[in-house]
């Protein structure tokens, strides 16, 4: 009888020091904020949720590369951590070859440096070089950044029908930072220096 009571107290103590569930500062903050993860070689890998980034720091799998003095503070039972903007893996991770980088509007705009592929003015739309109605694909090779007037004038015609030319041949970008650009909506200003040329 006495023995059983003692073990129940032990159970309660065990629960009170449980560190597997960090206390949330704000639920929405956890979902919104991203942390850039670099390989041990400083190659950008991905954008992590705050929760995953904090777990990697606490487990000793990653180190802080770029502190964010204004970053949110996260409390667990035993730690208070100012969430950094960039962290780096302690051990190198081999990144498997993946055939294609997904095309997103944001990444396409970055590739074309926010310039219209036809006239060079500021782009605000995506145009299919061979229109979709004429069998054109929704791919890196057939999509370009375009200004609204050019997009409107081109409509569903081919470049040969208009006598237009592209300022450069559209290509699929290569490199990890492009993969990252195609998966995130917003870039933290502190990330830019780690993303390599053409990223910003
Ligand atoms: Zn234009």
Image (tube, grey):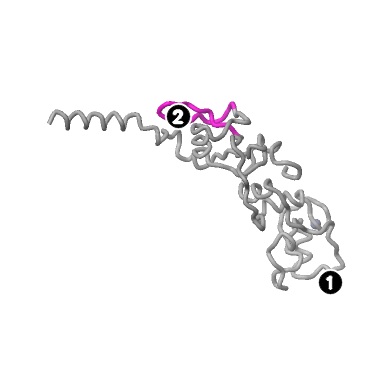
Question: Which residue occupies 63% across, 40% down?
Answer: 39
Q: Which residue is mark 1?
A: 161
Q: Residue at x 59, y 37 (%)?
A: 91
Q: Position of residue 6 (x, y in %)?
A: 20, 28
- Where the C terminus falls, by quadrant? top right
Q: Secondary structure at mark 1?
A: helix
Residue 145 part of the magenta-drawn span: no
* Label 2 sits on residue: 75
Find residue 147 and report its image quarter. bottom right
Residue that lies at the very extreme toward the left in this rendered image: 1
Q: In terms of image quadrants, where is residue 134?
A: bottom right
Label 2 environment density (alpha carbons within 10 Å; few <14, some 14–19, many ≥20): some
Q: Decide if residue 12 is on the left or right side of residue 144.
A: left
Q: Looking at the image, which residue is at 84% across and 72% down? A: 161
Report the predominant secondary structure element of the magenta stretch.
loop
Is 71 contained in the magenta span?
yes
Residue 158: x %, y % from top left: 79, 70
Range of the magenta residues? 69-85
Which residue is rendered at x = 78% and y = 70% of the image? 157
Residue closest to the eye, 115 or 137:
137
Q: CA distance from mark 1 to mark 2?
A: 63 Å
In which quadrant of this rendering is ligand 1 seen? bottom right
Callout count:
2
Residue 168 lies left or right of residue 66; in this view the side is right
Return the x and y of residue 186 as percentages of the image width and height.
Answer: 62, 43
């Amino acid at each position: 009888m006495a023995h059983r009571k003692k073990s129940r107290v032990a159970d309660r103590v065990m629960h009170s020091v449980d560190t597997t569930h960090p206390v949330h500062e704000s639920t929405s903050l956890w979902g919104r904020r991203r942390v850039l993860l670099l390989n041990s070689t400083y190659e950008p890998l991905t954008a992590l949720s705050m929760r995953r980034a904090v777990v990697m720091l606490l487990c000793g799998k990653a180190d802080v590369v770029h502190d964010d003095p204004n970053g949110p503070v996260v409390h667990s039972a035993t730690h208070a951590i100012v969430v950094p903007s960039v962290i780096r893996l302690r051990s190198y991770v081999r990144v498997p070859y993946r055939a294609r980088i997904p095309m997103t509007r944001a990444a396409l705009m970055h590739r074309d440096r926010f310039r219209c592929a036809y006239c060079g003015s500021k782009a605000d739309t995506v145009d299919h070089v061979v229109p979709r109605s004429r069998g054109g694909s929704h791919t890196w090779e057939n999509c370009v950044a375009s200004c609204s007037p050019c997009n409107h004038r081109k409509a569903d015609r081919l470049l040969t029908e208009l006598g237009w030319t592209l300022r450069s041949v559209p290509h699929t970008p290569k490199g990890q930072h492009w993969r990252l650009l195609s998966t995130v909506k917003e870039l933290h200003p502190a990330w830019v220096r780690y993303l390599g040329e053409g990223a910003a």
